[in-house]
Amino acid sequence: MYSVRLARTGFELRQHRSAVFEVYRAGSLHNIEETMKGYEMLNEIESFADGTAYWLMAPNNILTTQRLDPIVTPGKVSTHVHSVLGGSGFGLNVNTSILQESECTSIPIQEDKSNYWFPQLYFQKNDGSFASVSGNAVICRCFPVAPDSANVTAPFPNNFRMLSGDTTLRTLNASSFAQQAVTFLCLQFSGTSKRYNELPVGVSCPAGIRSQINFPSCWDGKNIDSEDHKLHVAFLSTGPDNGTCDDPRYPVILPRIFMEVYWISQDFEDQRDQALTPSQPFVFANGDPTGYGYHADFVNGWEDGVLQKAISGCNCNPYGDPSCCVDAGIFTFNQTRQCFISNTVDEPVLGNLSTLPGANPVQAPCFESYIATSTPVILAPVYTYCDPCYTDSSGDVYLEGGRIT
């Protein structure tokens, strides 16, 4: 299916792992080892020679897509639309205890009720209207496997949150680790999928576009948040996915979150001649047609003690398959249970739209702050839907496709 050769650089390793992700996404976790035999040498190099273990998760579904961002604009309607993964406790305000009480999670690891979110992508038509682009996510969580206690990875503390990326950027500073953390792949059916620092311009991506983002993985060890939601964390010493936490201001190693979203942009390939900008017809919800303003957010919602157990013991498979962690009783894994919540913000955000939600203007190469002149109605209560559902700890049974109130 894929040709395999020895990868000597971090970029080559990531390119090969991208092919692994495609196998993972197209198939099933239960036969991932069968389909990845050819990667034994590659993964041995990546997972053990560089002292890193990891596991992959393809979320079962998008929890919700709406104009909420409880990190940047808590308690308010956000400036732009995000698609959200994780625990059903997501809402105008979140913290670890709220998320731990989630009635379901769209993450296969059932003990991970954290929330992860990213801006929605749209296709801009030549009449100025927009159509939403469907996307599917894969999350890789990586952590060093080090024999010395000085370099042990710590779990995220309760109420920890962070942001990677900057919604206001429209140009590239190639020396910035924060901007190196954001990349895009123009996916091909065969051959090499080229990597870009921006949304690919002037090229066709017949197998879709994949947005990729690394979160910082060094922490100051004290603050669970900061004014810009970034100052309490830092990237590794030599780049977003390489190096150590050797800065004394950020001495604590956190699990590195690498999140990619596979956008089914190929559905719009035959409509490029109907786009406002045929050479690059896509724009993110924050009005960004460049990709430089791509970003993602994380709030910790792991059940107490589980992530620490995973860090200590979930390094048993070189392919990133967490099945052996399940077998060891570290966490539970369910790839079929879907989890959704009803909207808090009463406005259409998917399908065909006359404007971007929040009336965000498309802006490049400069960004100017924009505040919508009207605010949608806030809906309550919020309902949680699961399919199939399950029996909870109190013995209450939720029916398949049923509603949890």
Image: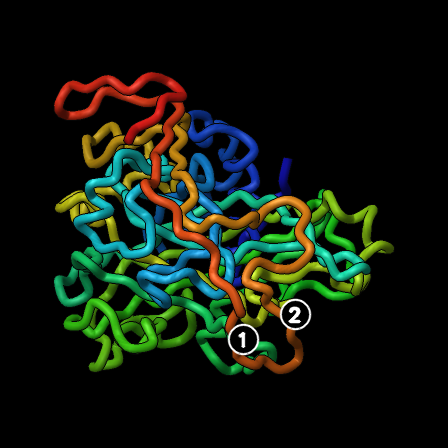
- The quadrant holding residue 135 is top right
User: In the rendered image, which quarter contains the C terminus?
Assistant: top left
**In which quadrant is the N terminus drawn?**
top right
Q: Nearer the viewer, residue 311 or 42?
A: 311
Q: Residue under circle 2?
A: 362
Of residues 14 and 225, which is closer to you in this image?
225
How has the structure been colored for display?
A: rainbow
Q: Is residue 204 above or below residue 36?
A: below
Residue 319 in sight in this render:
no
Asked if labels 1 and 2 touch by Cβ distance under 8 angstroms, the answer is no
Q: Position of residue 295 (x, y in %)?
A: 47, 65
Q: Is residue 38 above or below residue 345?
A: above
Count residues near mark 2 (Cα–Cα under 10 Å), then give few for <14, some for 14-19, many for 20+.
some
Q: Residue furthest right?
A: 273
Residue on which the image places disc 1: 370
Q: Is residue 379 left or right of residue 94?
A: right
Query: Which element is circle 1 on?
Result: loop
Give the quarter of the image for residue 33.
top left
Q: Note whether residue 184 is visible.
A: yes
Of callouts 2 and 1, the N-terminal one: 2
Estimate the x, y position of residue 219 in percent, counting from the top left: 24, 70
Q: Specify the amino acid type for callout 2.
A: Val
Mark 1 crowd level (few <14, some 14–19, many ≥20, 10 Å Cα): few
Image check: 158 left or right of 210? left
Q: Amino acid at mark 1?
A: Tyr
Residue appearing at x 66%, y 67% in the figure: 289
Q: Is residue 366 left or right of residue 97?
A: right
Residue located at (75% from left, 61% from top)? 128
18 w.r.t. 339: above or below: below
Quarter of image, res 4: top right
Number of disc labels: 2
